[in-house]
């Protein structure tokens, strides 16, 4: 069945505007300044950011559906930060491998932009290529390589991706934790994990982190004029780097172990924006 966003007569930006209007009406917040997509291991940050004004089941908002992945929550939360700004916390990520189309993947980002958000924080759980990141390291994304063979941009829409992941925001993150390292994120289509040979390919072309999200969302965020911070929780070393087979249960467990630490870190970073 074709996802409603992918029908030829549908303007995805108009649907995003309708979704933003619904969020504005339900939450009572006219403008959200920051948006965060919380991936595996990052969800507790929503509780630490500030006062929750409103929590909305994502499936109640046009264009959103329930998350397909265990470990992801299916809600949109409006949070008032301690600095007086408002954050839209997105716990409903659509992955490219769900085959709903790239418009559905980036709908949350476009909706966030329509709520007024000028900063987009994209987090994920991912595999690490650098051995020193074993054990739940949080890593800043400095750039990405998109291996999905797709883009959220349509038509002759040539968007520059230089400094896509904001040096300014990464600098603020390092003010909070000077030990944070950076890496290049490589988005594969999934849902299968990468083969050891694919991981070596990613390493050869400059990748440090492998995963199944974020790059397409970041492109859409840049198209919408947002400043982007990307962070990965290294839930495991990638295939061939790690010598034991990979499993989703392992990813969930690693995320749970690191959740309190990395969520506190993210909350401390965001209130400085």
Image (cartoon, helix red, strand yellow):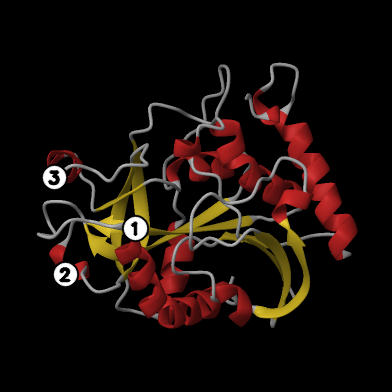
User: Label 1 belongs to which residue?
Assistant: 248
Up-down relation of residue 86 to residue 26 (above or below): below
In the visual, does 229 lie left or right of 146? Answer: right
In the image shown, does 244 or 162 lie closer to the viewer?
A: 244
Residue at 49% x, 77% y is: 263
Q: Position of residue 217 (x, y in %)?
A: 52, 44
User: Label 2 belongs to which residue?
Assistant: 132
Mark in front: 3 vs 2: 3
User: Label 3 belongs to which residue?
Assistant: 196
- Secondary structure, mark 2, is helix
Residue at 18% x, 39% y is: 198
Q: Position of residue 240 (x, y in %)?
A: 11, 51
Q: Are marks 2 and 1 in contact (CB under 8 Å)?
A: no
Residue at 42% x, 48% y is: 163
In the image shown, does 103 or 169 lie closer to the viewer?
A: 103
Q: Quadrant of residue 55?
A: bottom right
Mark in front: 3 vs 1: 1
Q: Quadrant of residue 49?
A: bottom right
- Secondary structure, mark 1, is helix
- The N terminus is located in which quarter? top right
Q: Earlier in the sequence, mark 3 or mark 2?
A: 2
> Distance from label 3 to label 2 (Cα)?
18 Å
Q: Earlier in the sequence, mark 3 or mark 1?
A: 3
- Secondary structure, mark 3, is helix
């Amino acid at each position: 069945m074709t996802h409603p966003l992918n029908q030829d007569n549908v303007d995805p930006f108009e649907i995003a505007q309708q979704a933003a209007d619904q969020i504005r009406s339900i939450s009572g917040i006219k403008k959200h300044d920051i948006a965060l997509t919380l991936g595996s291991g990052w969800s507790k940050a929503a509780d630490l950011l500030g006062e929750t004004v409103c929590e909305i089941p994502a499936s109640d908002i046009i264009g959103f559906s329930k998350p397909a992945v265990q470990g992801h929550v299916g809600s949109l939360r409006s949070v008032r930060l301690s600095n007086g700004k408002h954050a839209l916390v997105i716990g409903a990520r659509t992955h490219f491998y769900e085959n709903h189309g790239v418009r559905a993947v980036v709908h949350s980002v476009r909706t966030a932009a329509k709520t007024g958000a000028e900063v987009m924080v994209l987090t994920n759980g991912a595999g690490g290529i650098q051995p020193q990141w074993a054990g739940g390291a949080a890593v800043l994304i400095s750039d990405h390589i998109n291996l999905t063979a797709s883009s959220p941009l349509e038509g002759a829409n040539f968007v520059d991706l230089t400094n896509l992941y904001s040096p300014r925001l990464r600098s603020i993150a390092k003010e909070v934790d000077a030990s944070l390292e950076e890496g290049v994120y490589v988005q594969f289509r999934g849902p299968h994990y990468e083969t050891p040979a694919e991981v070596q390919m990613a390493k050869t072309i400059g990748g440090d982190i492998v995963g199944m999200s974020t790059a397409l969302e970041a492109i859409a965020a840049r198209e919408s004029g947002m400043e982007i911070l990307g962070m990965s929780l290294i839930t495991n070393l990638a295939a061939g780097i790690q010598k034991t087979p990979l499993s989703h249960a392992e990813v969930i467990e690693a995320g749970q172990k690191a959740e309190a630490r990395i969520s506190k870190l993210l909350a401390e970073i965001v209130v400085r924006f």
